[in-house]
Amino acid sequence: MVRCGKRQITDSPVTEQPVITETRDDLFIITLNRPDKRNAVDRPTADALRTAFDAFEQNTDLKVAILTGAGGNFCAGADLSALSDPQRRNEIDEAGSGPGPMGPTRMLLSKPVIAAVSGFAVAGGLELALLCDLRVAETSATFGVFCRRWGVPLIDGGTVRLPRLIGHSRAMDMILTGRPVAADEALQIGLANRVVAYGTALDEAITLARQIAAFPQRCLQADRLSAYRQWDLAQEEALRQEGAGGYPVVFEEAIGGAERFRQGAGRHGKFEE
């Protein structure tokens, strides 16, 4: 079970829960907590991750989630020692539907998620990072399809999200070679959105999340959803959907925002809290 409470900042978390969650005002921090396994995900961890993301999605008071890992690594992917157990192989859905093997990777979330990445974000860990809207990576971060060497396929969204994020050619380079991608290259190709100093990814992600949470949320969520949905549509239909999704936001938030601007808010880059 995933319990909400204050996250203890230690080199080795004292709790044995595979996933720790913490609420900070309207932010929700989800921490993979198997540092001795580089936060590799077994079935209980996948279930706990799914439960945590469900809790975030259903709580209307929460605006932005942050996914991170304990002990200096984000996530090394699926726990191959668990996958090699013949008794556990039936946990993989033959039809490719239902929850992803890593837990939340097939969810279509309505609110933003930021990955705070240190150390390894590889194989299924890369796919968890790709689930997130933004990735804040420390200089120590390494991304890669390391499952290539073991014959483990990307079945948690990697072959879908990676080409959409960085382009087909660059994705093929990563997918076919399984090579490591360091933080500076990840930033250059758009895999990382920010590169920050060692040990600061979570703090920087929290700062970014607070900036996002401060915006009018109905408008932000509508624009985010439209940006994702357009991938499945022809340009004409995508434009129509954008307009239809934005129309109610004009009356719910935009008119009020325009009135605040008319009264002087936002002048010289200064916005009200």
Image: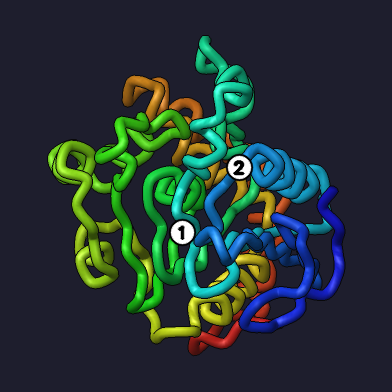
**Residue holding disc 2:** 42
Badge 1 amino acid: Leu
**Quadrant of residue 10 within the rendered picture:** bottom right
Residue 194 x %, y %: 37, 72
Give, as a three-letter code, the residue at label 2. Asp
Q: In the rendering, at what x and y percent does residue 148 appear?
A: 27, 38
Identity of the residue drawn at 44% across and 43% down:
124
Label 1: element kind: strand
Locate residue 112 relative to residue 44 in the image: left or right: left
- Spatial CA span between label 1 and label 2: 25 Å
Q: Quadrant of the C terminus?
A: bottom right
Residue 157: which disc? none
- Regarding residue 26, the answer to whether it shows in the image is yes
Mark 1 neighbour density, 10 Å: few (under 14) some (14–19) many (20 or more): many
Near mark 2 (Cα within 10 A), the count class, few <14, some 14-19 or many ≥20, is many
Residue 106, above or below 259: above
Query: Which residue does the image show at 68% across and 56% down from the upper left?
Result: 217
Q: Percent position (x, y) of residue 90?
A: 60, 17
- Please tell me whether residue 213 is drawn above or below residue 90 in the rendered image: below
Question: Which residue has dot 1 on it?
Answer: 134
- Vertical side of 94 occupied by 246: above or below: below
